[in-house]
Amino acid sequence: MRLDKFLKSSRLIKRRTVAKEICDAGRISLNGRVAKAGSEVSVGDVLLVRYGQRTLEVRVVELQENPRKENAAQLYEVLTGSVEE
């Protein structure tokens, strides 16, 4: 699954276009490397998302095309999270 699609379907980022813009700005890392929006995401991959003043590190647990809103958080496991001031 494409990285921007995963970010949208997992609801880590609200819109896919915003996810693409953040990827293009180099604010998403996939397994320690800066990732593009079209990068393939697999189960077990670790994402580092820097969005606004938030930094969130998550591990991909499951891939689903269109999960229900209440199940979206089950697609990933939060490893670390922080807010920069």
Image (cartoon, helix red, strand yellow):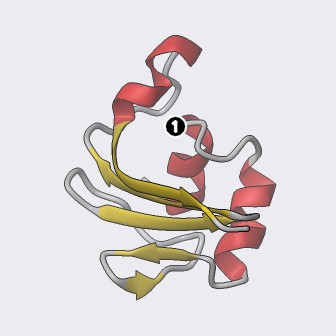
Residue 20, above or below 12? below
Image-based side of 48 in relation to 52, left or right:
left
Q: In the image, residue 68 lies at what x, y percent?
A: 53, 14
Q: In the image, residue 40 lies at what x, y percent?
A: 39, 66
Q: Residue at left 67%, top 47%?
A: 13
Name the image quarter holding residue 51.
bottom right
Mark 1 neighbour density, 10 Å: few (under 14) some (14–19) many (20 or more)? many
> Which residue corresponds to mark 1?
10
Q: Residue at left 58%, top 44%?
A: 12
Residue 85, above or below 80? below
Name the image quarter holding residue 20.
bottom right
Q: Amino acid at mark 1?
A: Ser
Q: In the image, residue 24 lies at what x, y percent?
A: 70, 80
How many numbered badges does the structure rendering display? Answer: 1
Name the image quarter holding residue 9.
top right
In the image, farthest residue toward the front: 85
Image-based side of 54 in relation to 63, left or right:
right
Q: Residue at left 50%, top 80%?
A: 35
Image-based side of 30 in relation to 59, left or right:
right
Indicate the secondary structure of the residue bearing disc 1. loop
Residue 33, above or below 28? below
In the image, farthest residue toward the left: 44
- Image quarter hosting the C terminus: bottom right
Image-based side of 52 in relation to 40, left or right:
right
Q: In the image, residue 73 lies at what x, y percent?
A: 44, 28
